[in-house]
Image (cartoon, rainbow, N blue to C red):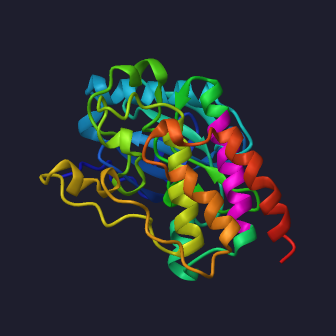
Amino acid sequence: MKQSWGFTQGAQIGNGLTVLQTLGGGRRYEVFLVRDENVGARAVAKVLRPDRVDDARAVNALRREASFFERLEHPVLVRGLGSVLGGPYPFLLLEYVDGANLRDVLAAEAALPVGEALDLALDLLAAAEHVARHEIVHLDVKPSNVVMTDAPRLIDLGAARTLAELRIRRTPIGTAAYMAPEQCDPGSPLGTIGPPADVWGVGTTIYHALTGRRPFSKPGPRGGELHQRYPQLVEEPRSIPDYVPEPVARSLLPLLARDPADRPTAAEARAFLEPLAGEYAER
């Protein structure tokens, strides 16, 4: 069972941070909307759960994520605002972006208009290109990590790793339905995980945004065979419905090439998607 701090509205995390509400969390962290009294603005605090405070691996993971936010400032990436890694409540403080995530938007609207989906693709590819320049891979590009504000933002660097770390990686990493094949089976003949994995993540996310569904079958349970747990290891992407314009469908599919060497770079993908985005923006 996940342990919780049980913070309610008005609780003090430290450094002038007052809890406004709980936003959710995961295995290692609880996430809170807070008011930063030092600057008079809202922010997001990602706080280690009580049973993880003395877990060196969890603290180091938070430290790594904080260092990535310091290095990777970009208009499409949510900003890091600092961290406190000691004391009773180790936490990472992040910019608060007010908006629904893409997963919730798609649950309500089924799919995005073509022009909006292509604009989103360009934004996410720009972020992927920026991250790659710093020899880091995000590894978790997916609808729930995209906040749909006027200028969409990519959040959560919890899964991100440096290229040096990925060269020795031998276990899967990411969210099953949006993981590139090489993320599913590191060390396989597909090669080392690198920036092409984020191109794949953008591809699966935009496929979902355009069609309202994911490109591959539902991932199987953890205990199953690798190809059952990760259908993208053996399946081809589902056919893109006819209501998606053929030039758009044709340009999206290379991002989902099983072999990372066959995928365009983020910069190359932006170059051939940009004219399409301009064309469909007017429709």
Q: How many marks?
A: 0
- Let me know if residue 134 appears in the view: yes
List x then y, in percent, for residue 176.
34, 53
Q: Nearer the viewer, residue 94 or 266?
A: 266
The C terminus sits in image quarter = bottom right
Q: Residue at x 72, y 52 (%)?
A: 122
Q: Is residue 192 above or below residue 279?
A: above
Horizontal placement of 187 versus 241: left or right?
left
List x then y, in percent, for residue 125.
66, 46
The residue at the far left in this view is 223
Q: Main secondary structure of the magenta part?
A: helix
Q: Is residue 180 above or below residue 188?
A: below
Q: Residue at x 21, y 57 (%)?
A: 228
Image quarter for residue 113?
bottom right
Q: Nearer the viewer, residue 280 or 60?
A: 280
Q: Nearer the viewer, residue 170 or 58?
A: 170
Which span is picked out in magenta?
116-129
Residue 123 on the magenta span: yes
Q: Residue at x 39, y 60 (%)?
A: 236
Residue 41 on the magenta span: no
Horizontal placement of 270 versus 191: left or right?
right
List x then y, in percent, for residue 261.
50, 35
